[in-house]
Amino acid sequence: MIVQTGIQPISVGRRAKDRIIQMLIFLAFALALIPLVSVLWMVVGNGMQRFDLEFLTHSMRDIGARDVGGGAYHAIVGTLEQVLLASLIAIPIGLLTAIYLVEYGNGGRLARTIGFFVDVMTGVPSVVSGLFVLAFWILVLGMPFSGFAGALALSILMMPVVVRSAEEMLRLVPRELREASYALGVPQWRTIVKVVLPTASTGIVTGVMLAVARVAGETAPLLLTVFFTDSINNDPFQGPQMGLPLYVFDQAGRPTDSAIDRAWTGALTLILIVMLLNLVARLIGWWRSPARRRS
Amino acid sequence: MAKQIEVSDLDAYYGSHKAIEGITMTIEPRSVTAFIGPSGCGKSTFLRTLNRMHEVIPGARVEGKVRLEDQDLYGPDVDPVSVRRTIGMVFQRPNPFPTMSIFDNVAAGLRLNGRVSRSEIEGVVEESLKGANLWNEVKDRLHKPGAGLSGGQQQRLCIARAIAVRPEVLLMDEPCSALDPISTLAIEDLIAQLKKDYTIVIVTHNMQQAARVSDRTAFFNLAAQGRPGRLIEMDDTSKIFTNPAEKATEDYIAGRFG
């Protein structure tokens, strides 16, 4: 073969390859969108039927097996409270762990051990975390079924996700920024609070929201810990509560059409809640970012 | 303000690797001292030992003495944070805090170090930006992000940030290596002004720059690749550049190696 030198046009073969790969990537993208779009389509289509004020403001108390109507208010309250409590437990612990790993651990023995156990926790199936809370909190310590027990189980699932995503984001903060701060005579902890965390905040918020979204849809750990109820229970520390995933699971298992409709609407509500939380978090992130001031 | 630095028999390590060895020198107050030498000879490492920034890197440590007037910076009960507050530093690449405005960047050292009144901060910010020859360019957009400035402006912003905490000494690690000639000139003019009030130490790869801005020059070199860097000689800049005592210095300045 003769090796050609000099400046040349792009060969036909390379052009064709470029096109083919481009098409393949586009195809893969479209393929990946199919399940997402179809799920959204089904949930919105089927869920809109019962997405009304009654659904959002009423519980299932005194709704008979064949009755139409009823709602998920008790489940919405339960989900919001459980996810809030789980976040209150998991986010601070997760963030502090990530800060330790990145800023203080220096890859030492303790940091590596913690990192290993975070990985192990990531692999814990959600039903196992529910079983753990059931066995330890409820059976051994004798605590009642409650929304708080559910929040404990959810926080176990949430923690490793928060640690890993926050860790990634903190590692992205350039070393020069930390050094710039040290060189001004700023102690390490203030550097972390005032320079490192604000710089990584957008990414950390995204990671935290993903963790929230993940646990908001968990059914199995709730099944074993918050028990079950058709009534409104505003107190997450006392007595059985409900949660939206649990509600969907329960209603979808019932044999009547009105129950199936309620399950679809429950799923739609759950998606909307997660989306709303996401939007709020992003708005806060945008509102505090320097990009806003630039304009 | 502006104090003398005395270094005696200083070694610096990264883990088990000895980066510099046996450095002894005196840095005069209210003057500019330039460090020159080939890449990897430990100029920057040595600079970072002067305000205890070296030990920020995991595994790095220092042996020997650094005295600021009569205080030993590596004394057992010395707080490294207070050392860095006294000896400021400007880095090779401009590194303004990306989440902060121009104003907040300059105010960062004061704010992050404790409570200072609002009016006092405003005064210091204006004074520091004027000191860094940046005030006229940014006075109308103090609350825009610092990252929106040009490279040269960012570097002057970093200098303003460093002098806002009123250090005694200002260390500069190749402050112009990422800048264009015009910005470099602006920084060099600034250095000439700042030496009235500060002790300035500058690391540079640019020999003309060392000749232009410094009063005294120290030449560093390493015996061989992988061996620790050493101070070869230190003298008045005019002497180093016209009539150095060591052959190696002459060769380096003449561009025969490095």
Image (cartoon, coloured by chain):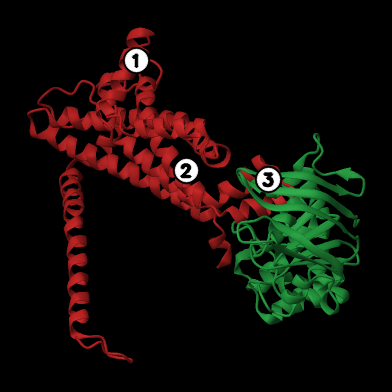
Label 1, residues with CA under 10 Å away: few <14, some 14-19, many ≥20? some
Residue B109 percent across, percent down from the top left: 74, 52
Please check whether the numbered discs 3 and 1 fall on a single chain: no
Chain letter, disc 1 residue: A
Q: Which chain is green?
A: B
From mark 3 to mark 1, how far is it between C-alphas?
Answer: 55 Å
The disc labelled 2 sits on which kind of residue?
A: Glu
Residue kind at label 3, given as amino acid type: Glu
The residue singled out by tag 1 in the image is: A239
Residue A2 picture location, percent across and down:
22, 88
Please state if A129 lies on the left or on the right of B103 as rendered.
Answer: left
Q: State the residue position of label 3.
A: B55
What x and y, as percent, mark residue A220?
A: 24, 27
What residue does disc 2 label?
A167
Helix, strand or loop status at disc 2: helix
Judging from the image, mark 3 belongs to the subunit labelled B
| Helix, strand or loop under label 3 | helix
Q: Position of residue A177 (x, y in %)?
A: 62, 54
Q: Nearer the viewer, mark 1 or mark 2?
A: 2
Upstream in the sequence, badge 1 or badge 2? 2
A265 vs A41: above or below = above
Q: Pointer 1 and pointer 2: residues touching (CB < 8 Å)?
A: no
What hue represents chain A?
red
B246 shown above or below A124:
below
Query: Looking at the rendering, which quadrant does residue B16 occupy?
Result: top right
